[in-house]
Each structure stands twice: as structure tokens, then as C-alpha cells.
Image: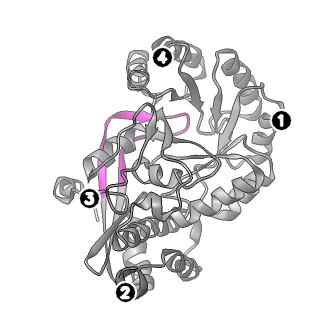
Amino acid sequence: MSTRSTQPVPIESLDVAAYEIPTDAPESDGTLAWDSTTMVVVSAHAGDRTGLGYTYAGPGAATVISSKLAGVVTGEDALFPAARWAKMQHAVRNLGKPGLVATAISAVDIALWDLRARLLDEPLTVALGAVHDGTPVYGSGGFTSYDNATLAAQLSGWAEAGIPRVKMKVGRDPDADSGRVDAARKAIGDDVQLFVDANGAYTRKQARLWAQRYADSGIVWFEEPVSSDDLTGLHQLVDFGPPGLDIAAGEYGYHLPYFHQMLEAGAVDCLQADVTRALGITGVLRVAALCDARTIDLSLHCAPQISAHVGTAIWHLRHLEYFHDHVRIEGMAFDGVLSPKSGVLYPDHRSPGHGLTLKSGDLEQYRVA
């Protein structure tokens, strides 16, 4: 065994930066519209290695990292990221962990796992104890701001690239949704699965009505038909919705109690979790354990370049959201990005850590913190 694996390796410093990157077109879903996405990137240094982590959150997450979390982990052993994670939980007690603070912890935790793997010269998927070779994806975008031609072009592009499942946004203009679904189905054909995501736009009764309509159109995944805070409404759809239409939610979960409550309520057929929100890799692996205990699948939400590695370590993995904005941003931000092969992201076992390197010069024009 190498000395690097047996001797403590103190974390020397954390660097953090935030970048606000415009979308390539106006975007909206059932409840929100946006024209930019902010990425917060952490670089953790120890020995002669640097680990990279990131989250999608406001610039305030960078302030939490530099003012609070950097001091918690600096000087501690880089070989034990889970121990650093536990210490960060205690340190933020008075800040209010769910929300922005959880995203900050997530970015640091991802960086520390990457750093550990690089110090030990092993791929992150190996460090996490992979049970799968790769992580299946579904193409995601289909914004309500798109006209039908743009919607059809995006979804058919994923289908032609070999991704066997795609998702579109619904709920902003219900009168238009039947036509949009028809356009999507025509574009992708009958052999590609079609998912819809309402982002909590419907009332309970509207959601039950649309659940039947979507099922009749061959749709198999209905995400956040009502607010993810409405566990009773979600449970009603799980119990009384059309057979073959899975109800999904969980992308806005920031810590374990949220996911425990959602599962206890029987609110989903498939749980979702976001590694850049739910307290990082260490947090999401604990969410996965909650799913394992109930033999329920977990679907990872966005951030494909890190989620691809984490997904290989999740026993009851369903798939990963290959989200248009994040695919584009991560391609701009990093060298070493993965591309799907027949609808699966396969981590590169030749590279230590997650294999990404930051293109800081390319991003500098977008820096806001």
C-alpha cells in the first residue's frame, strides 16, 4: 500500500468561485422562468492534488463556503471526506441547513471526494464502491417556452443519439399541453419513452385529470404533478393514479429528514435526489440507503458529470436526468466530460477522481463571485 493511503494528508485550502451563465434561449417550466444559471465551483487542495466540486445555486453559496466551511475542513485529513461532511453539519447549525447552505456543503463534499480519489489515484466510481458499470440517462429540457418545432427538434435529437427516454415540461398553459405532447410523440416515435414534469403547477384535481390524459398518451413518468411539499396530494396520485404512470418527486430535498418524510408518506413511485443539493455525495448515498431499505428506485437529478459517477454506486438506481442546461454548462466549464453511449454515461476508469479539469479561463467572463 502506498504511503499516500496510510498517512494523513491535511487539506491545505479551499478556493471558490461563482459563474452566472446565460441560457441559450429563454426557458420556463410550469411555475418558473429564467434566463441564466449560476454554478458555484470549489477547488480543494491537499498534497499535490486538487479536487473539484460544484453546485447550481446563488452566489451566496460561495460566501457560505469561504466564510464558514473552508475553516471547518482546512487542516483536516483529506482521506476521510465523510468525517469532514459530519463536521460541516455541526458547523452550520445556526445558519439553517436546508437550502443555500446545503448546496454549499454539497459542493465541498463533492470536491473532497474527488480529492481523496485523486490522492489515492483511483477513479471516483471505484472509490464509491460501484455496483453498476454506468448510469442510464434520460434527455431533459422540453421547456414550456419552446414552440412545438423547437420542442420536437430537441427531443428527437436525444432519441436519434440513442437515449431511449426523454422528458418535457408541462403545466404552464394546460390548453396547449395536449398539442405539445402530440408533437413530442410524433418527433420521437413509439419506441422512446416520454416523461412529463409539471414542477408543481397543478392542483390535486387538475393533476388527477392530467394523469389520466398523460397515461392515455403513453406517458410513463409524471414528475411533481403537485407541489413536492404536498405529500398527501402526491400520495393520492401514487395510490389512485393510472397504472403504468410513475409519480416522481424529491429534487428539492436538501437533507435526510425531507426524503424520509416523502418515503414514509408513500408520496412517490420513484424518489429523486440531487447530488449538488442533498448534501453532496455523502448525503445522496444516505438517501440511496433509505431507498434500499424500501426497495424503491432512486433517480438522480441533473449535474450529469458528477451524478454519472454517483449513480454507479446506487443499488436501486433508476436513471439520471441529462438536463439541457447542465449538459451545456458542464461542457463549457470542464475538460473531460462524459457523453452518453446508447443512453448510458460510463465513467472513465483511466482517470483518477471524476476526471474533470476546470476551464477557468473560459469561464472568467461569467464570474460573479
The amino acid at mark 3 is: Thr
The amino acid at mark 2 is: Pro
Vertical side of 200 occupied by 113: above or below: below
Which disc number belongs to residue 357? Answer: 3
- Quick check: is 117 in the magenta stretch? no
The amino acid at mark 4 is: Ile
Vertical side of 147 occupied by 34: above or below: below
Q: Find residue 338 and report its image quarter.
A: top left
For label 1, the residue is 239
**332 horizontally vs 137: left or right:** left
Q: Secondary structure at mark 2?
A: loop
Label 4 and label 1: CA atoms lie apart by: 30 Å
Foreground residue among 74 and 174: 74
Label 3 and label 4: CA atoms lie apart by: 34 Å
Outermost residue toward the left in this view: 361
Which disc number belongs to residue 298? Answer: none
Q: Secondary structure at mark 1?
A: helix
Q: Secondary structure at mark 3?
A: strand
Task: Decide: few, some or many residues near mark 1? Use Cα within 10 Å; few <14, some 14-19, many ≥20.
Answer: some
Q: Earlier in the sequence, mark 1 or mark 3?
A: 1
**210 horizontally vs 362: left or right:** right
Q: Earlier in the sequence, mark 3 or mark 4?
A: 4
Marks 1 and 3 close (CB-CB < 8 Å)? no
The amino acid at mark 1 is: Asp
Q: Residue at left 50%, top 26%?
A: 164
For label 2, the residue is 10
Marks 3 and 4 close (CB-CB < 8 Å)? no
Q: Earlier in the sequence, mark 4 or mark 2?
A: 2
Q: Is residue 127 visible?
A: yes
For label 4, the residue is 188
What span is in magenta?
19-38
